[in-house]
Amino acid sequence: DAKTTQPPSMDCAEGRAANLPCNHSTISGNEYVYWYRQIHSQGPQYIIHGLKNNETNEMASLIITEDRKSSTLILPHATLRDTAVYYCIVRLPSGGSYIPTFGRGTSLIVHP
Amino acid sequence: EPEVTQTPSHQVTQMGQEVILRCVPISNHLYFYWYRQILGQKVEFLVSFYNNEISEKSEIFDDQFSVERPDGSNFTLKIRSTKLEDSAMYFCASILLGGAGEQFFGPGTRLTVL
């Protein structure tokens, strides 16, 4: 089972910030938080990742709580093209003996 | 920008036939994965592959499935005798070891078993 919990759906007005929460209360000290999204039936697309510091890139910002038990992905100015299923995944950074697991994610609908 | 590619984009086959799905990971990536997604369901892990051998596999990855890296660039998934329930999107992914650990996914192959 996925080690994360996300709301099944959210909606957001175009141009507004979309804040997608994720709970990962069982995260271990060396596991990272990764966010991906899947637009329709395309392959999942990497968005951002972090360990304990907040991170920002050209796509989004990631806010991780101090206890690392939850995080929030922020799309600062959502567009219609951001409509997708967003997945929060907790795992080791690469390799290792683990099985990366996708949950059901959050279906974000951006409306005009 | 380098990307993972997959062929074919759509494969239609008869039940019981063998299929081979092909992936070309990003050239300097060393860790590879296959996932599948049945229509309307979650993305499911099948197998990971490193250093020319299987690293991890899920219970879905039974004896009907095999993976291979035949020539140092292609990464293939073979289904020996397809079943109706194998109909799904199959995604290949790769990771750069020593990098940030982000998986790069291909566009997928839609497999339809009739």
Image: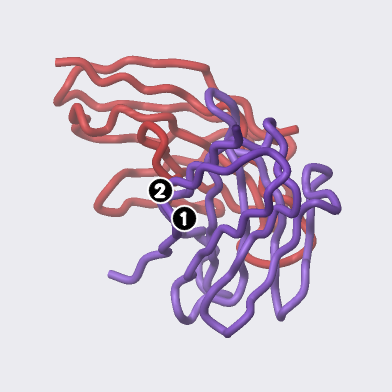
Picture quadrant where residue A10 is located: top left
Left or right of residue B99, residue B5 in this image: left
Q: Residue at x 54, y 37 (%)?
A: B112
**Disc 1 on helix, strand or loop?**
strand
Quarter of the image where one finds residue B113:
top right
The amino acid sitting under disc 2 is Gln
Q: What's the amino acid at mark 1?
A: Phe
* Pointer 1 residue: B105
Query: Which residue, given by chain and number where applicable, does mark 2 sit on?
Result: A45
Vertical order, A87 against B6 (above or below): above
Image coordinates for residue B105, horizontal then vertical, percent: 47, 55
Q: Colour of chain B?
A: purple
Residue depicted at 29% across the width and 35% down the height: A75
Pointer 1 chain: B
Q: Tell me: A23 left or right of A75.
A: right
Q: Residues within 10 Å of mark 1 (few under 14, many from 20)?
A: many
Coordinates of residue B9 in the picture (x, y in percent): 41, 50
Residue B30 place in picture, x, y as percent: 59, 77
Q: Tell me the SS state at disc 2.
A: strand
User: Which chain did the image draw in red?
Assistant: A
